[in-house]
């Protein structure tokens, strides 16, 4: 998150003063108030901390911390800054005790306290209970990235370029030249544009660039647009279509059968028996290349699909009283995905392809 | 195991010894000399007779109460045996926060002479356990070693505020003063309606000589007034002063006439004074001279040479039990620095000169009343401090004669003035001037606070307030009591040992702000395993504010106390006078009556519920401090500040007794405490904030909280606060709701006018807001917290813009609007505008799908199909399912979309979290 960078900078500035206590909490780590309290006491180095361990029960800790904060005086004690990352998760704690107390301290004449909450949720205020909300200062800062594409490309250039203090100046200038050339390349720009369109954040950009850079080797010392193409292929690839490539012909046939069933029954769930019927019809009518499989074999193939979660039972988790053959299933694939996979499938029998393409079974 | 045979463990029978020595016809009481207790299984009976020290059954079997037997009588039927006693307290019975005042480790067998007239001194004869030996030990002597366990030692006197040296005379078993009680006609103060002078006198004298309550069956308030009338000077000085202070405070008009003790008191005053005068005529000076001179009060010598009214005063001041006054006197630095009695005498002689002036031109009755006050004043008139005291001292009785300039004088002499704050203009209205004084004090405090921060280290112990209830007393209150507390503090510090002068001057050299903390501070025996919870102190001093705007806001941010910050406690709570009065009356009446009760207070957040209750408690504590009403404990618990409803027991117990226990054990202990009869128990006021969180399935926590006050001996007042008005009906089961009773109060949200008033009062001196801007802020919501936040933000914005361009320097409409926009404008539209192209497309796809389905919900698969189509229309490369899902999740994490768990994959249901119009609006503008 961008917020964090901003905060880090801010902290670095303020650290100069040296009389600020910083407590950092993360909603993902401190999943309930109990752990959070222990963490706070630990980070504040209060006196009931021995080594890195905090003693006492939850209730004791809470009372202790509140006491400590209450003792504080505006002029004598060091201000404390609480940074609550994943703030929305703190709001899910029972009764929001921690938030209430922190905000209450910040609103009363006790130890000076600032509470900063970071979250990606825009509606986080609605999670707060009304008495907690009333204590909140209603101050929000929204960080939106309003980057334009040229700026985005500039960032890419900045990220890839080598700095001045690189040990080999010749190489670094050569490299930087190649980078700026790359940044004007049409296909590279296309890829970047696409990435930019999907998401503006820098993490996705970095993961893309990381793939690009990882293709470098001693023999391949400069980046080329081919690297970008390859990386983008990897990032934009659809995971399910990839899975389909690894299926056997039989399994693929089952998928096609399911697709047809989906077409005829307009997305209604189906069971194995229906698929098997569809498959048998196909074999009887058209198939020349495909053997007639035994039902148990087909069943085995189907179970493999279930394991891959390309097919999923309708009532997931429920105790199945129905026989496996008659359990209602749903296909987790889109039409386009199936067709695309078929196109790319190596040595796909033509009759199977035709069957997939035909409107009716 | 119990060392004494309590009623539970053994059967005891009580028998009078001999014939009644006297008979009170009016009350039909038979007075006896002694009583014998026979315990089953023991052969020899225990005989207790008057003057003996006895053990009385109490809460704790191992530590029964100790008392001296003063009277024994039986009612007409002869069945009910009653004993009148003088109490002694053990260390463990002294409130834990006061225990440290002793300044040393108490001897295990040490007890203290209990000197508190508000305490009931009659006990059921059946509770007497046995006789005990008590030995008085002079202050300097060590405790004797190797004595038997049954022996108790008494060294000091405990008057609920401080430890003082005990006059051995007080310990004498009744001698001369025993006679009045046993005399055949002994109506004592019961005869108040028909005041027989001689009887009154005798009662008086007995009180004077022994200094304990021997006035028979009178209710405590009467006893107090009579008592204080008789002992006059010290207690009177204090109470009068307090009353005057109360009169100057804004809350005085909130008090009901009925409850204001000043009325009764003044009547009793006059009575007592009349009596005193009589007494002085009869009593010889020799008596005065025999009173111990080892005490610090030196003015005794003075009395013989002054005649008539002066005698009255000095007599009363010098009587042996007037330790309080002497303590008061001793607080006086100049007095202490004058070791020579002669010098002192001169001093007093000089000072008494103005006295005749003072009571000229007054009504005769008043004249009788005034001299003592005046002479009292004269006793300590040598510094401005005491002059101020005396002036305020006169106020109550002279209410009719109150001159406005008096108030001003007081105002100018208040310590706040010394702090280089701008002088207030002369105003005649009393309220106004006192109010100004308060503010000045407040300001002064802040200054001091600042300086405290700078010289931090040498008095770090001052900054460790230990008790919550004391914590709750705010700056404002402290400001109001600065001077009085100075004295109180010194008195407390004085304790048993004779105070060294260096110590004293040090205390007085302190700024007033520090001293109140001091009271709380001294090294207190902490529970051993608990470390000191404190935040490390800062290294650099906090900043000071610059201009007016900054003053209005910045103080908040850097060194606190800013007027607009929610935390800064206002001098008074405007617009809550009615509620204040109601709660005040409720609690006060309960405290005075020594009964229990519940009250339920509701209101939406930010309407000042907790603040008002705290204010009430503050002013009650203030009056308790001055002995207007009996002392009480104040305990506050907050449903939000505990981890589990049952922790409430633990917290209450801890705050009451500093004990730690598990919830179950704590509940049992509290149960015992509130149901056991204990004559010396102080009333407890319990504030339960956020009551709804104490809800449990069986509701036993709430049940107990509301059940305790109904016990006969509980003396518990419970104030509960919650947000919802119908909480009792909604979540409480019947038996809980019925115990809560019908004392309800609801705080309405502040109206537009009230908020305006609040902000105005907060800003007060500082003129920072334009008028219409203020109105806009006030019109927005009923939540005072929010309102103040808006103001604060607006000031910040104004300040920021003021740096760039020289504006008017006041917060105007535009600034407020800006602040409002910042706080309450919807962020969704901005978020949508800043989203990436695909995200925007996805939102459009969602809209399109919704329109197609006519529903507000669609599966991801359906939306995705739309999305693909849109991509083609826009000429973008269609995205894959994985990408589409990623986009969808991103929107979901911002909560622009509401999503189900991602495991559902294609069948994930999508809903909009924003209105469709908003999305359209946001997307169209691009």
Image (cartoon, grey):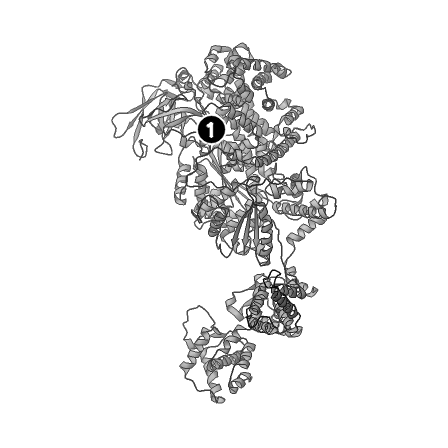
- Find residue A177 and report its horizontal and vertical position in percent: 65, 68
Total labels: the figure holds 1
Above or below — where is A289 with respect to B285? below
Front one among B503 and B720: B503
Which residue is denoted by mark 1 in the rendering? B160
Secondary structure under the numbered disc 1 in the rendered image:
loop
Front one among B845 and B441: B441
Above or below — where is B698 with respect to B464? below
Front one among B101 and B738: B101
- Find residue B746 and report its horizontal and vertical position in percent: 57, 43
The C terminus of chain B: image quadrant? bottom right
The N terminus of chain B: image quadrant? top left
- Find residue B3 and report its horizontal and vertical position in percent: 31, 32
- Mark 1 Cα shell of 10 Å, populated few (<14), some (14-19), many (≥20): some
Q: Quadrant of residue B451?
A: top right
- Find residue B378 and report its horizontal and vertical position in percent: 58, 17
Q: Taking A171 as reference, is A35 left or right?
A: left
Q: Quadrant of residue B849?
A: bottom right
The answer, for residue A129, to whether it is visible in the render is: yes
Above or below — where is B559 with respect to B149? below
- Please state the chain letter of the residue tagged with numbered disc 1 in the rendered image: B
Q: Quadrant of residue A86?
A: bottom right
Front one among B510 and B645: B510
The answer, for residue B858, to whether it is visible in the render is: no
């Amino acid at each position: 998150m961008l917020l964090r960078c901003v905060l880090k900078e801010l902290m670095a500035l303020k650290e100069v003063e040296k009389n600020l206590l910083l407590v950092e909490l993360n909603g993902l780590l401190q999943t309930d108030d109990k752990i959070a309290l222990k963490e706070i006491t630990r980070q504040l180095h209060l006196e009931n901390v021995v080594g890195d361990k905090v003693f006492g029960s939850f209730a004791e800790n809470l009372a202790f911390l509140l006491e400590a904060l209450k003792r504080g005086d505006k002029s004598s004690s060091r201000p404390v800054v609480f940074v609550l990352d994943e703030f929305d998760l703190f709001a899910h704690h029972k009764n929001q005790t921690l938030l209430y107390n922190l905000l209450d301290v910040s609103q009363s004449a006790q130890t000076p306290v600032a509470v900063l909450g970071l979250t990606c949720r825009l509606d986080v205020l609605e999670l707060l209970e009304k008495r907690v909300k009333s204590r909140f200062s209603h101050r929000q800062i929204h960080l939106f990235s309003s980057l334009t594409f040229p700026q985005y490309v500039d960032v890419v250039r900045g990220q890839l370029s080598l700095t001045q203090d690189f040990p080999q100046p010749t190489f670094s200038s050569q490299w930087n030249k190649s980078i700026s050339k790359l940044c004007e390349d049409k296909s590279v720009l296309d890829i970047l544009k696409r990435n930019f369109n999907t998401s503006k954040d820098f993490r996705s950009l970095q993961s893309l660039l990381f793939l690009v850079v990882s293709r470098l080797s001693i023999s391949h010392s400069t980046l080329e647009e081919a690297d970008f193409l390859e990386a983008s292929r990897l990032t934009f690839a659809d995971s399910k279509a990839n899975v389909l490539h690894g299926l056997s012909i039989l399994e693929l046939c089952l998928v096609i059968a399911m697709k047809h069933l989906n077409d005829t029954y307009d997305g209604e769930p189906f069971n194995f028996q229906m698929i098997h019927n569809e498959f048998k019809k196909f074999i009887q009518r058209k198939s020349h290349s495909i053997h007639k499989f035994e039902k148990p074999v087909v069943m085995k193939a189907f179970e493999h699909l279930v394991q891959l979660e390309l097919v999923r039972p309708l009532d997931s988790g429920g105790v199945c009283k129905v026989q496996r053959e008659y359990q209602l299933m749903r296909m987790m694939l889109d039409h386009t995905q199936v067709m695309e996979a078929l196109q790319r499938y190596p040595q796909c029998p033509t009759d199977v392809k035709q069957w997939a393409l035909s409107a009716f079974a | 195991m119990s060392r004494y045979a309590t009623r539970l463990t053994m059967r005891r029978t009580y028998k009078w010894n001999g014939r009644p020595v006297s008979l009170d016809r009016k009350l039909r009481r038979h007075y006896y000399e002694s009583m014998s207790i026979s315990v089953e299984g023991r052969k020899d009976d225990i005989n207790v007779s008057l003057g003996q020290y006895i053990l009385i059954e109490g809460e704790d079997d191992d530590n029964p109460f100790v008392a001296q037997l003063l009277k024994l009588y039986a009612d007409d039927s002869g069945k009910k045996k009653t004993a009148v006693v003088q109490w002694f307290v053990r260390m463990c019975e002294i409130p834990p926060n006061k225990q440290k005042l002793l300044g040393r480790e108490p001897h295990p067998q040490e007890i203290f002479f209990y000197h508190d007239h508000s305490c009931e001194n009659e006990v059921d004869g059946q509770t007497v356990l046995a006789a005990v030996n008590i030995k008085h030990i002079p202050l300097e002597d060590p405790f004797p070693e190797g004595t038997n366990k049954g022996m108790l030692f008494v060294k000091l006197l405990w008057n609920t505020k401080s430890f003082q040296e005990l006059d051995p005379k007080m310990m004498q078993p009744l001698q001369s003063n025993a006679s009045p009680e046993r005399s055949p006609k002994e109506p004592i103060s019961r005869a108040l309606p028909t005041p027989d002078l001689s009887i009154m006198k005798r009662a008086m004298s007995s009180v004077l000589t022994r200094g304990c309550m021997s006035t028979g069956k009178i209710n405590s308030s009467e006893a107090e007034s009579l008592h204080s009338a008789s002992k006059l000077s010290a207690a009177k000085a204090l109470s009068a002063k307090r009353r005057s202070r109360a009169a100057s405070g804004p809350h005085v008009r909130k008090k009901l006439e009925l409850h204001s003790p000043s009325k009764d008191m003044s009547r009793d005053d006059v009575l007592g004074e009349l009596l005193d005068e009589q007494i002085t005529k009869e009593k010889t000076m020799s008596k005065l001279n025999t009173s111990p001179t080892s005490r610090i009060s030196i003015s005794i010598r003075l009395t013989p040479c002054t005649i008539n009214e002066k005698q009255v005063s000095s007599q009363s001041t010098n009587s042996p039990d007037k330790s309080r006054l002497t303590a008061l006197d001793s607080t006086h630095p100049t007095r202490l620095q004058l070791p020579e009695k002669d010098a002192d005498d001169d001093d007093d002689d000089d000072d008494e000169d103005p006295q005749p002036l003072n009571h000229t031109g007054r009504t005769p009755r008043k004249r009788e009343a005034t001299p003592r006050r005046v002479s009292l004043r004269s006793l300590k008139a040598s510094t401005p401090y005491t002059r101020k005291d005396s002036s305020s001292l006169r106020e109550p009785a002279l209410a009719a004669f109150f001159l406005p300039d008096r108030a001003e004088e007081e105002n100018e002499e208040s310590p706040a003035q010394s702090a280089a704050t701008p002088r207030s203009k002369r105003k005649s209205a009393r309220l106004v001037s006192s109010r100004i004084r308060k503010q000045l004090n407040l300001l002064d405090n802040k200054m001091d606070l600042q300086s405290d921060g700078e010289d931090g280290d040498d008095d770090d112990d001052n900054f460790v307030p230990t008790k919550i209830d004391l914590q709750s007393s705010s700056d404002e209150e402290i400001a109001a009591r600065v001077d009085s507390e100075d004295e109180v503090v010194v008195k407390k510090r004085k304790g048993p040992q004779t105070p060294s002068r260096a110590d004293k001057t040090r205390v007085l050299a302190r700024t007033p702000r520090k001293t109140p903390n001091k009271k709380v501070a001294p090294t207190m025996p902490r529970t051993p395993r608990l470390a000191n919870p404190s935040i490390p102190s800062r290294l650099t001093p906090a900043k000071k504010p610059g201009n007016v705007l900054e003053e209005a806001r910045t103080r908040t941010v850097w060194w606190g106390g800013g007027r607009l910050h929610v935390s800064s406690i206002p001098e008074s709570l405007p617009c809550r006078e009615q509620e204040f009065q109601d709660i005040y009356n409720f609690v006060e009446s309960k405290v005075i009556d020594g009964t229990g009760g519940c009250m339920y207070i509701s209101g939406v957040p930010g309407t000042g519920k907790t603040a008002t209750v705290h204010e009430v408690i503050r002013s009650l504590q203030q009056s308790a401090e001055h002995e207007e009403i009996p002392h009480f404990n104040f305990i506050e618990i907050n449903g939000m500040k505990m981890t589990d409803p049952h922790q409430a027991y633990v917290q209450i117990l801890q705050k009451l007794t500093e004990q730690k226990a598990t919830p179950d054990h704590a509940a049992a202990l509290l149960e015992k405490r509130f149901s056991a009869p204990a004559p010396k128990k102080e009333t407890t006021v319990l504030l339960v904030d956020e009551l709804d969180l104490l809800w449990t399935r069986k509701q036993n926590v709430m049940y107990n909280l509301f059940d305790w006050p109904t016990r006969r001996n509980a003396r518990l007042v419970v104030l509960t606060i919650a947000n919802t008005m119908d909480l009792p009906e909604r979540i409480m089961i019947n038996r809980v709701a019925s115990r809560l009773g019908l004392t309800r109060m609801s705080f309405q949200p502040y109206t537009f006018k009230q908020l305006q008033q609040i902000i105005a009062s907060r800003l007060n001196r500082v003129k920072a807001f334009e008028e219409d801007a203020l109105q806009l802020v006030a019109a927005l919501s009923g939540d005072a917290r929010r309102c103040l936040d808006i103001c604060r933000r607006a000031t910040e914005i104004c300040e920021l813009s003021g740096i760039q361009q020289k504006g008017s320097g006041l917060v105007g409409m535009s600034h407020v609007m800006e602040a409002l926009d910042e706080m309450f404008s919807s962020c969704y539209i901005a978020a949508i505008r800043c989203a990436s192209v695909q995200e925007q497309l996805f939102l459009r796809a969602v809209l399109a799908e919704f329109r197609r389905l006519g529903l507000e919900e669609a599966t991801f698969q359906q939306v995705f199909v739309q999305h693909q189509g849109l991509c083609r229309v826009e000429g973008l490369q269609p995205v894959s399912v994985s990408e589409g899902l990623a986009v969808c999740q991103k929107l979901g994490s911002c909560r622009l979309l509401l999503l189900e768990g991602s495991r559902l994959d294609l069948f994930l249901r999508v809903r909009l979290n924003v209105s469709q119009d908003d999305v359209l609006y946001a997307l169209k503008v691009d």
